[in-house]
Amino acid sequence: MNADLSRRALITGATATAALGALPARGAATTAGRPAPPNILLFTVDDMGGDSPGCFGGRPDLTPAIDRLAREGLAFRRAHVPVAICQPSRSATMTGRYPHRNGAEGFEPIRDDVPVLNDLLRPRGYLTGILGKVGHLAPVERFAWDLQITPPQLGMGRDPEQYARFAAELFERARTEGRPFFLMANAEDPHRPFHGSAAEQRRFTPEELATIATPSRVYTPAEAEVPGFLPDLPGVREEMAQYLSSARRADDTLAAVLAALDSSGLAGDTIVIFMSDNGQAVPYAKANCYEHSTRTPLIIRWPGVTGPGDADDHHFVSTMDLFPTLCRAAGAPVPDGLDGRDLTPLLEGGGQPGRGHVNTVFHESAGQTRYEMRGLHDGRWSYIWNAWSDGLLEYRAENMSGLTWPAMLADPAVAARVDFYLHRTPEELYDLHDDPHALRNLAGDTRPEIVAALDTRRAALDAWMRATGDPMHDQYPHAKKGSFS
């Protein structure tokens, strides 16, 4: 089979041999009379908006593999990452703690005294592997991966066939050694530079470009859908088409890895998790605290635990919750001091109190400039405190590269939106029922309902900052006692 045909087979899942309806129940194998620890496949994509996959409200033709996984598992409609930037987000997932409690507020290493997930899985016999984004979990030596593959070995993190090849190697080794595996497969897509962009040509050498796969579908500006928080301008639409093509290639990569898992015969004993590390790398999304900055398309397929096509539209969950959930699944001790909570009751179809809202943070940009922000989001209200906003400091971040920000700068009709993004105000409050794209800041509104909503969220943020030891708490100007649920 030639390379093109091989890639096509992987992307379409033609090598899959097991239908999910026939998967054996978890715990079929035992170790010393106990259920054998399940395998774990954590698949992440980079900078995919929480509503981009078809199964989360996006284009129905964009993400067939993600949509299939959602039909086979449980999709969390109100899932968030705690911080909308790559390394801190991933570090929080792998420690179960907010950035200010694990040490990785920006592109810094996790503190030595904070356990990472691999620390808990290793004594349970897990074979561990990571594909891509190796350096975004630091210090790298703390994780002691049995297999670690860097982006250049993966078509610059953009070749589904290479992801499948290395995943298959780990699956076969786990089978041969009789060990459970934990594989963290990290697609670089749809991170910039997007497919077909001029930035892609500048970023990669001709030799590197030759290793990068073409998405199984490429979108045109006419087909693009512009997020509601951005203006529909030609430059924005062009970049959104490039983003969609890159998102499709991320889906191709998931399809290839899942096909390799199916072919290994281990799918029936494997928890599969899909998530994005943060929202789209455009203004008003990544590297901020807006609701669409941190919302992630979280899906968990756990044979024998989750049912096919389940969805949770009620509970707010965090990717930090994966840490205690996977510890429990593996039969490992759950450390004290976590911010994440075990998701097992929700995975089993039950409820869980205290999940009526989610807190999010932001500390510093990839350029290591501090822009301290705190967010609190529930089913209706989105509240943000911008500690950095003083009317003088201008916000700058990676999400302003590419075509979208220059297009906004060039259009006088969106000058006010541009200026607000650069400077913000100390507080933002949005009624997501009436304003789902967070376009109208209500923080200065004097209507009693708005004032009451703002006061409640001020009190809730103060309580959370005190409870988590947030170092910015002393600077929060609205500290007062209160409760929130």
Image: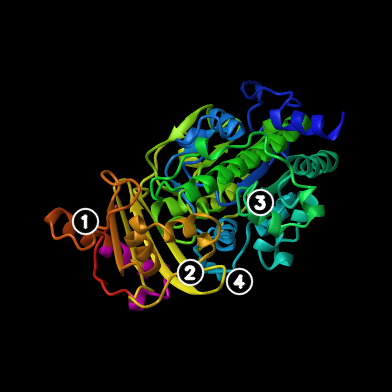
> Which secondary structure lies at badge 3?
loop
For marks 4 and 2, the one nearer the N-term is 4
User: Can you tell which mark lies on residue 108?
Assistant: 4
Kindly report the distance in space between the C-alpha atoms of the residues bearing marks 4 and 2: 19 Å
Q: Which residues are magenta?
A: 458-475
Q: Nearer the viewer, mark 3 or mark 4?
A: 3
Q: Which mark is residue 255?
A: none
Residue 188 is labelled as 3
Q: Is residue 66 above or below residue 469?
A: above
Q: Are the residues tagged 4 and 2 within 8 Å (C-beta)?
A: no
Number of numbered tags placed on the structure image:
4
Can I make out residue 44 in this image? yes
The image position of residue 170, as x and y in percent, is 79, 44
- Distance between the Cα atoms at labels 1 and 2? 30 Å
Judge by depth and name the residue closer to the eye, 27 or 34.
27
* Residue topped by disc 2: 396
Q: Is residue 461 magenta?
A: yes
Q: Nearer the viewer, residue 163 or 330?
A: 163
Mark 3 vs mark 2, foreground winner is: 2
N-terminal-most mark, 3 or 4: 4
Tell which circle, 3 or 2, labels the residue nearer the N-terminal end.
3
